[in-house]
Amino acid sequence: MNATMDKPHASWLQESFTAYESRLIHYARQFVGDWETARDVAQDSFLKLCQQERHKVGDPPGAWLYRVARNRALDILRHRKRHPQDELDGVEETLPHPGVEAKDERLPLVWETLKKLTPKQQEVVRLKFLHGLSYQEIRKVTGLSESNIGFIIHTAVRELRDRLQEPGSKQGQMK
């Protein structure tokens, strides 16, 4: 940290790091597929936070950090698309995620079902339910309107529920 940085700003940065580090790593991993790259994305996001004036970020800085992490992850994906030989094979989704108890044996089925949604639905559902962002914060991260976010969440949850209740699904058999 910069020695000339005022104490309140340094404290705010530390609190931001403590509150968002793990969440940003998990979020970035959903894009990039591996933990090492996800940590790099989170680190880049915090470096940008250190370089940004606090009043331009907002308080709390969550939506801003998610937006920076999302943009950095998408940059990496674009690079991988141009240079496929550098791309790692997809890594399976691991549990637990932040804010989610891994005690329920049905959770892996939920994750598998979530993967069947569109990428936009997956991102919005994860931001809302895994990362606890509000519609306004999701809007800042994704650039989607709040009404569009509400529609996406509504249709995604309905689709998840329908898929999980299908007669052949393990979820439907567990009831």
Image (tube, rainbow, N blue to C red):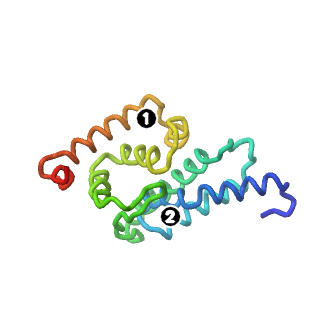
From the viewer's perspective, tell me whether residue 1 is left or right of residue 80: right
Q: Nearer the viewer, residue 130 or 171?
A: 171
The spot of residue 89 in percent (x, y) is 34, 70
Please rate how many residues cluster around mark 2, counting C-alpha atoms within 10 Å: few if below 14, some from 14 to 19, many from 20. many
Residue identified by numbered label 1: 149
The spot of residue 97 in percent (x, y) is 44, 59
Q: Residue at horizontal 48%, vertical 31%?
A: 146
When the figure is inspected, residue 61 is found, relative to residue 14, above or below; the finding is above
When the figure is inspected, residue 70 is found, relative to residue 144, above or below; the finding is below
* Kind of residue sitting beneath label 1: Ile
* Kind of residue sitting beneath label 2: Ala
* Quadrant housing the N terminus: bottom right
Q: Residue at horizontal 60%, vertical 50%?
A: 65
Residue identified by numbered label 2: 38
When the figure is inspected, residue 1 is found, relative to residue 138, above or below; the finding is below
Q: Residue furthest front?
A: 175
Q: Residue at horizontal 47%, vertical 68%?
A: 35
The spot of residue 111 in percent (x, y) is 32, 56
Verify CB contact (< 8 Å) between mark 2 and mark 1: no
Q: Residue at horizontal 43%, vertical 46%?
A: 129
Q: Nearer the viewer, residue 23 or 148?
A: 23
Q: Nearer the viewer, residue 152 or 84?
A: 152
Image quadrant in which you'd find residue 14: bottom right
From the viewer's perspective, tell me whether residue 55 is left or right of residue 169: right
Q: Secondary structure at mark 1?
A: helix
